[in-house]
Amino acid sequence: MDLINIINTALCVIILVLGYWGFTQKRMKAPLLIGIAFGFFGVSHIVQLIGLEASLLNFIITIRVIAYVMVVFALWMFAAKD
């Protein structure tokens, strides 16, 4: 087991939960989107932890690009708000 991936996965889950909690408290979409994005990052770390990185490399790349775009969009939404 790769300790860095385990830590990254745990932190992704924490951010996912906090993003959902932030959404339920403030009804702002940005925390939810960021939480979901980190959920995607967590999925990519789990794929690495179970040893499927080589066979699912395109999936990992795709899911990480989607996650980064979600974070960028969420931050843009937050920054563009009045």
Image (spheres, rainbow, N blue to C red):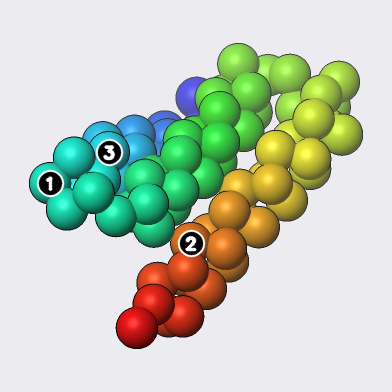
Residue 80 at what x, y percent from top left? 46, 80
Q: What secondary structure is marked by label 1?
A: helix
Q: Amino acid at mark 3?
A: Tyr
Query: Is residue 41 or residue 74 the one in the foreground?
Result: 74
Q: CA distance from mark 1 to mark 3?
A: 9 Å
Q: Which mark is residue 20?
A: 3
| Whether residue 23 is situated above or below residue 40 in the rendered picture | below
Task: Assign the C terminus to one quadrant of the image.
Answer: bottom left
Residue 28 at what x, y percent from top left? 29, 55
Question: Which residue in the protein does label 2 denote?
Answer: 74
Query: Is residue 25 or residue 65 the one in the foreground?
Result: 25
Locate residue 22 relative to residue 40 in the image: left or right.
left
Q: Can the viewer see residue 3 in this picture? A: no
Residue 39 at what x, y percent from top left? 46, 35
Who comes first in sequence, dot 3 or dot 2? 3
Locate residue 8 relative to residue 72 in the image: left or right.
left
Q: How many other residues sit within 10 Å of disc 3, few (<14), some (14-19) or many (≥20)?
A: many
Question: Which residue in the protein does label 1 denote?
Answer: 25
| Whether residue 10 is situated above or below residue 15 in the rendered picture | above
- Marks 3/2 in contact by CB < 8 Å: the verdict is no
| Whether residue 48 is situated above or below residue 66 in the rendered picture | above
